[in-house]
Amino acid sequence: IGKVKVRNRIVFAPISTNLAGVGGEVTERMIEHYHRIAAGGVGLVIVENACVHFPDGRHGATQPRIDSDEFIPGLYHLAQAIHLAGAKACIELTHPGGVANPEVTGTQPIAPSPIPIGAGKTTPRELTVDEIEELALSFGEAAFRAKRALFDMVEIQAGHGLLINQFLSPLTNRRTDEFGGSLDGRFRFLEMVIDKIKECTGEDLPISVRLGVEEFTEGGINLSEGREIAKRLERVGIDAIHVTLGKSGREKRLEPMPYPQGWRTYLAEKVREEVGIPVITVGVIREPWFAEKILEEGKADFIALGRALIADPEWPRKALEGKEASIRRCISCNECVRARHYEGLPIRCALNPTVGLSGSLAMLRRADIRRRVLVVGAGPAGMEAARVCALRGHEVYLYEREEKPGGALNMASKIPGKEKLRWVVEYYIHELRRLGVHLRVGKAVDRTVVEALKPDVVIVATGAEPIIPDIPGVDREKVVPAQDVLRGNIIIEGVRVVVIGGGLIGLETAEYLALKGNTVKVLKRYRTISKDIEPIYASYLLTKLEECKVDIIFGVRVMRIEPDRVIIKDDEGRIESIPYDWVVLARGLKPSRDILRELDGFDCEIYIIGDCLKPGRIYDAIFGGFVTARQI
């Protein structure tokens, strides 16, 4: 890329971590995070969105800053940590423009035009020409600081609905001066930014542009115009184009689980047809064979992995060594997005419990005394506990009463769009075998098993069972738990189904049933979608339910279930009856702890983890298994 030669064609895409300090300084945890990514074998590491202009350019309370010389020492240590692991270091230069949060910046957002960008957003103030020139210079000065901090190159963020994208897009740029109107005008600010970077850095610092080439919105940037912008960028002398999306909504930029692998690659392919500089593609690329195929077919020159390297920083090394089966493939559950964007917390990962932890906490120490550990239940919590115990040198026995490991993941993977959950099970099966865990399936644990094994430690990970609500008529023949439907124990097709419960299980079961030709109504007690559902996936799921013509009835109580109809009462006290052929119960889960009776009287340590401690998300299960196994 320009004069920078990297060791392979794998790029770590910039992902905000919330690991910087509240003043924008680089922290030790941030350095450790990026060192860990680089040490996994990636060729180029692009550090997350750095603020180039303070305070209006702040895009988060814990975003790294590069707007002042005081931040150079910390950035230097960060770049060196990446270099020490053998990778090249790049940093993304960013300004949020009109999507900045006034509660974070303390100022009114600024933008090309005074157009609110998104529902409920503050109307930004239109930039003056003098301010535009000042902002362009701030990018140039930031690039010079990156160069002084020994970064090998910089990347300009010109996508994702942020400031430069706002100038490029007709949706957000309604200016009538030289910075608006035709593409010539809308491109002018980005060209000015590039000129200032070259002017400030002496034209020898390679520049990549993260370009939003498609907005999937009428009146916005389309692929044809995106390709034209790419050609202009090559003409003004940049060194690479990192193809991404523009202002298209988070669902398409931070895709939930149902989106297929590499669905965006065609955008990079079309851009590559127009330019002779390296093109980087990104978006739900999860497996080495798939990434290699993109390169072999000439669709891109580099593969950017973001969430995939959060889930497994050693993805590149494992791919190089032919150990693909040991890769924790990201399932796009967006636990990382939930933490960073919605909870304001440091980055975390459902599959990788060490993400964001300091080095000492992330390391697994060999146990001082080897112990015999019995893990009961091979769901995600139990499998992670068994894996970590084995890594620490314990003798591990993992029992699962079903015929295959996976627990609730086996059921959940049958939900439309959630097939990637099978990857989690496949990973654990491979790792447990590799580590010598004694896996027993189709075998329930009772006192006889415990007496024979004589374990020092028992980890109970027996999951959860459905809550059967106290509703008159709930014991009727045609009333069944959602779990029985999803497991395939009961086949329901082409009839009327009422789903009681509008949480995640209820809504996903409703979609599953609708796709089998059923007419589905969901009865939901409250008028809002549960906060337990990741917001991006919630938006996707509600759209799918609407497409499937699923009727969600909010704010109702179920009074009773009669032989052919469900009687409900709304918040106004009105009574209504809904006819059905089947009723499906989805009112949540409760811990399943029957095994504890079998353990009574044995002289061993007992730990309870996963859903049988408290029903939760896959993150809770795996992190709980990891934490518990570290203590043994």
Image: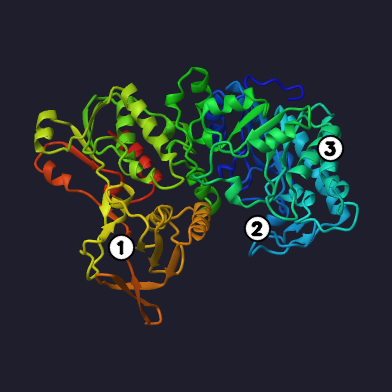
| Res. 232 mark | 3
Query: Is the N terminus in the top left, top right, bottom left or bottom right quadrant?
Result: top right
**Given this view, does label 1 or label 3 mark the residue nearer the observer?**
1
For the residue marked with disc 1, what is the amino acid? Val
Q: Is residue 8 above or below residue 337?
A: above
Q: Is residue 46 left or right of residue 521?
A: right
Residue at the right extreme, as displayed? 178
State if disc 3 and disc 2 touch (CB < 8 Å): no
Sort mark 2 into few (<14), some (14-19) or many (20+) by Cα contacts within 10 Å.
Answer: many
Snapshot quadrant of residue 457: top left
SS at mark 2?
A: loop
Residue at the spot x=22%, y=71% of the render?
A: 472
In the rendered structure, the answer to whether residue 510 lies left or right of residue 462 reads: right
Describe the element under mark 1 as helix, strand or loop: strand
Residue that badge 1 annotates: 583
Viewer-nearest of labels 2 and 1? 1
Amino acid type, callout 3: Arg
Where residue 183 appears, x then y in whole percent? 85, 48
Circle 2 sits on which residue?
A: 101
